[in-house]
Image: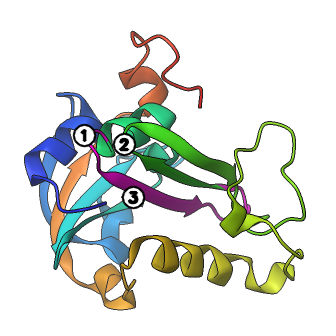
Amino acid sequence: MRRRDHDEVVEIFGRGDAVAVGTAVFTELDRLRGPDPGRVEPFLQVLTRDEYTVTLEHNGWSGSFPEIARRCSADGEWFFSVCWNIHAAGMTTQAVDGVVTASFESVFPVEPRPRGGDRRPAWAIGPEVESAVTWQVCMAHLERQTGVEVEERWLHEPHPTYRVLEPHWLYRDVDGADRI
């Protein structure tokens, strides 16, 4: 997203329930997890690069949650999120000025037409891509749509880190929070 105040971003992703756990390296976040390996514990990292605020999520899908996308893009701003898990499930989400403008499965980053439930803009319509390059295409979408040059080193640098709750729980009192 365009540069936003660090505390404001943490508030949007955590709604007052974010717990600061200090500065950590993304690739080492598993060590912060509790004793139950089956429990999903989402972590959020917030960093500023040039005129952008970037969030990294470990075990989280908050960036694909419509209400978070709307709030991060409010007041004429924009927001773009790509996420996936080890099972190849994921979402690409874009919001502009508080409106979700893209929401589709990341495993299908380009398709000839929208699938049921998709909100697929023109930049994501075209010939299907090979599954071997799905994630690369998602990251290319992110870079083309935002101007943010994604850097692998972000995963190896320490950043302020927060434990956050699942967004469906955080925004359970907001009507339509999970709908585009």
| Mark 1–mark 3 distance (CA, rounded to whole Å) | 24 Å
Q: Which residue is mark 2?
A: 97
171, above or below 137, in the image: above
Query: Which image quadrant for residue 154?
Result: bottom left
Q: Label 3 is placed on what type of residue?
A: Glu
| Mark 2–mark 3 distance (CA, rounded to whole Å) | 23 Å
Q: Residue at x 19, y 44 (%)?
A: 10
Q: Is residue 33 visible?
A: no
Q: Which residue is mark 1?
A: 75
Q: Please identify, in this view, whether the residue under mark 2 or under mark 3 is nearer the observer.
A: 2
Q: Is residue 168 left or right of residue 119?
A: left
Q: Residue at x 39, y 54 (%)?
A: 79
Q: Residue at x 59, y 26 (%)?
A: 179
Task: State which tag comes first along the sequence, 1 or 3.
Answer: 3
Q: Residue at x 44, y 44 (%)?
A: 62
Q: Which residue is mark 3?
A: 57
Q: Please identify, in this view, whether the residue under mark 1 or under mark 3 is nearer the observer.
A: 1
123, above or below 14, in the image: below
Asked whether disc 1 touches disc 3, contact meaning CB atoms under 8 Å apart, the reply is: no
Q: How many marks?
A: 3
Q: Label 1 is placed on what type of residue?
A: Asp
Does dot 3 land on a helix, a strand or a loop? strand
Q: Which residues are magenta?
A: 74-90
Task: State which tag comes first along the sequence, 2 or 1.
Answer: 1
121, above or below 125, in the image: above
Q: Label 2 is placed on what type of residue?
A: Asp
| Residue 80 on the magenta span | yes
Q: Is residue 175 visible?
A: yes
Badge 2 crowding class, 10 Å Cα cut-off, few under 14, some 14 to 19, many 20 or more, is: some
Give residue 88's position: percent from left, percent from top: 73, 63
What numbered label is drawn on residue 47?
Answer: none
